[in-house]
Amino acid sequence: MTARILIADGTATARITLKVRLSAACYDVCTVANAEDLSGQAHLYRPDLIILGTGFARESPVDMALSLMGQPGLAAIPIIMLANESTRLQALRAGVAAVLDPMIDEQMLLARIRGLLRDSDTAVSPADALAEAAATFGPAPRLTNVTLVADNPARAMRWRGALQKRLDAHFTISTPTETLAAAARGQGADLYLIAADISTRGDGLRLLSELRARNGSKNAAFVVATESHRSELSAIALDLGAGEVLPVDLDSDAGVEMAALALQTQLLRKEECDKRRIETQRKLQWAMTDPLTGLYNRRYALPRLTEIARDMQRRGDSFGVIALDLDRFKTINDNFGHAAGDAVLANLARRIQKNTGDSGLAARIGGEEFLIVTPSQTESEAMTLAEQLRDTIEAQPVTLPRLSGGGSIAATCSIGVAIGQSCDATPNPERTAELSMERADRALLKAKSKGRNCVVLAQPETVI
């Protein structure tokens, strides 16, 4: 989907010129000419990025930015401000994502936009729209680890001496080799400040690319420092994943403060990205698992069964499919209550998971129905596992919760076992998985008809 950018500038020429440049880059662009229209248009248009220019009659762009960041539904939208050097520090203190020279070249502007859009997720749900506005700029909530990789130890020490007075962080001076080794050990930093030229021209950008590609460091924040005569590297660094580009020399109090604010902004953005990533993982986990037992649910298990069938087919291997059903579960609910039934199911799930191990798939696919899939397993191995499950469930009564009157209850299960095998004549993993499941279900029904609390092996059939 094309990113939406809202441009606010009081000067018509600047506003139109910027719209033409961004529209040519295939962005969806909307413009406003005054502060009065900015807030309403932002709520209506829901941009992914806001660019604040100059030329407003009464309002300060910094005040306009603060107003936007204080409104529910708009606080998470990154803001680029086009302002001169005198306003830059004030804007960074306010929490603006980036402050650029109004005469910035197109390549650098587009690189900045790409970087902010890459790292930001500004889609607002109805719940988000009702949430309180995010807090404005403030210190990172915990002590962070910052790794400094400069072109020489003296510069790295100057960086550390200047920045540690303004950032509550632990600073480590490191070489490229040491930095990569630490990331490989899972000891990556929260933020890396890397010189664009370390030993050779542009080797800092190669280090950036390596760190961005490694599990131990790919989620860190990155800032690249360049010499003034190497400005062509700035756009490249942003496109490679740097969140900010700074001058390599921090030779004034204002320069040091702007660098510290820039690093702190990147750390806060990293924190927000981490929160979104954890939330996404949590939602995925909810979508895949059964909340009562913690096992996978039917929605995840059946497609996964097909994937296992496909993998085994490629390897010419077999796999076990075990259908397990708790015997007379309705009587447990009727006689002891649903809390007792839930306790029995949760206990049963733990025993299934323990016996299945990490190599197999264990899922709850119905009320008291469970599915176990075991890759690379023979008929005898699958039958042995099924008997272990049946014996484990029968041997140990389940302790009931006090809500159900306490005590314990014995439980048994019926199990059907089928072996899924590849068929060279018809290499159809979907059909193989489907028939294996059907055969295991039929074997389960046969186990119930034989008096329950037993294991029945399904007879092999030809996959068609």
Image: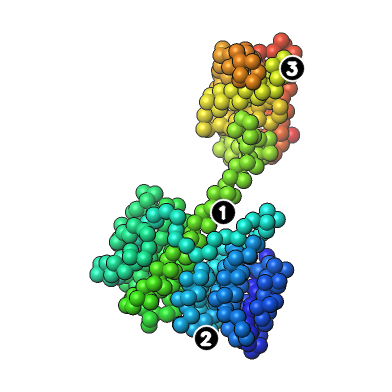
* Residue found at the far front of this picture: 58
What distance separates the C-alpha of mark 1 from that of mark 3?
43 Å
Q: What residue type is labelled 3?
A: Asp
Total numbered labels: 3
Name the quarter where the N terminus is drawn.
Answer: bottom right
What distance separates the C-alpha of mark 3 from that of mark 2?
77 Å
Q: Is residue 350 visible?
A: yes
Count neighbours of disc 3 (C-alpha within 10 A) and say few if under 14, some if 14 to 19, many if 20 or more: few
User: Which one is in front, 121 or 87?
Assistant: 87
Residue underneath mark 1: 276
Work out whether mark 3 precedes mark 2 in sequence or the reverse, and give the earlier one. Answer: 2
**Residue 90 in the figure: left or right of residue 404:** left
Q: Which amino acid does label 1 sit on?
A: Arg
* Residue found at the far top of this picture: 451
Count neighbours of disc 1 (C-alpha within 10 A) and say few if under 14, some if 14 to 19, many if 20 or more: some
Residue at (53% x, 57% y) in the render: 273
Work out whether mark 1 precedes mark 3 in sequence or the reverse, and give the earlier one. Answer: 1
User: Which one is in front, 70 or 320?
Assistant: 70
Q: What residue type is labelled 2?
A: Met
User: Which one is in front, 117 or 197?
Assistant: 117
Residue at (36% x, 73% y) in the render: 256
Q: Is residue 149 visible?
A: no
Work out whether mark 1 precedes mark 2 in sequence or the reverse, and give the earlier one. Answer: 2
Looking at the image, is 125 positioned above or below residue 396?
A: below
Residue underneath mark 2: 103
Residue at (38% x, 76% y) in the render: 255
Residue underneath mark 3: 334
Where's residue 289, x and y in %?
62, 37
